[in-house]
Amino acid sequence: MAHILDEFIPKKDRPAFAFIAAAGVLNHFLYSWSGSAFAAFFCPVNESVWEHLKLLFFPFLFWSLWNYLYKKPNPSAYFSRRLFAVLCGMLSIITLFYTYTGIIGRNFLPVDILIFLLGVIITLRLISKFTERSFVALSATSVCAVWIALVLCFFIFTCFPPDIPLFFS
């Protein structure tokens, strides 16, 4: 059983997986529990796919920042790898959700939870793959600008969601 688990979540990624998964689950309920406008920036405020991407994005960002402060790696390469990995993880969530709901015609909570967890696994696995191979990093300014732009998109689209299905509750 442990070998099967190692295939999905290597031992070195388990603390990150545990934190991101637990924080994502907690974030799902935090806004409704608190009703705080501040929590709305980091937690889903409705049942749209866009809002649920926050469950991966913000815990992953906070884990990455904490890990960066602890390990002090090259910031450009570190945050570039993580940026591409989380974008792929979020894209996998969107793709899997719309594929299975398009085929079946509705969503099922257990499948949605599994898709979230798979998005976390994909994100963490891609970081490992990007680290193992030569990876062209963005400049520190560029990668910082893209991270900030993504955070701002989450904040802005929470308040002013576009009228497209990704943002429908």
Image (spheres, rainbow, N blue to C red):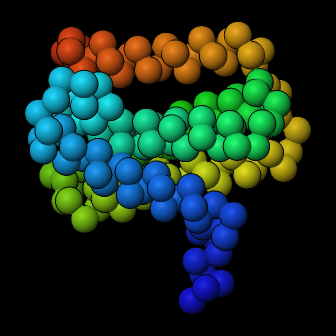
Q: Would you identify the image quadrant in which residue 143 lies?
A: top right
Q: Is residue 92 left or right of residue 140?
A: left
Q: Is residue 41 above or below residue 59?
A: above
Position of the N terminus by quadrant: bottom right
Whole-percent x and y of residue 138? 75, 19
The residue positioned 73% from the left and 52% from the top of the image is 128
- Give the x, y percent position of residue 144: 63, 16
Question: Can residue 84 be seen?
Answer: no
**Residue 168, image x and y in percent?**
17, 28
Along the line of sight, which residue is nearer the eye, 49 or 159?
A: 159
Relative to 126, residue 62 above or below: above
The answer to whether residue 86 is visible is yes
Residue name at image x 45 percent, y 37 percent: 57
Residue found at the very far bottom of the displayed protein? 1
Query: Quadrant location of the C terminus?
Result: top left
- Image point (70%, 28%), residue name: 80
Identify which residue is drawn at 21% across, 15% down: 159
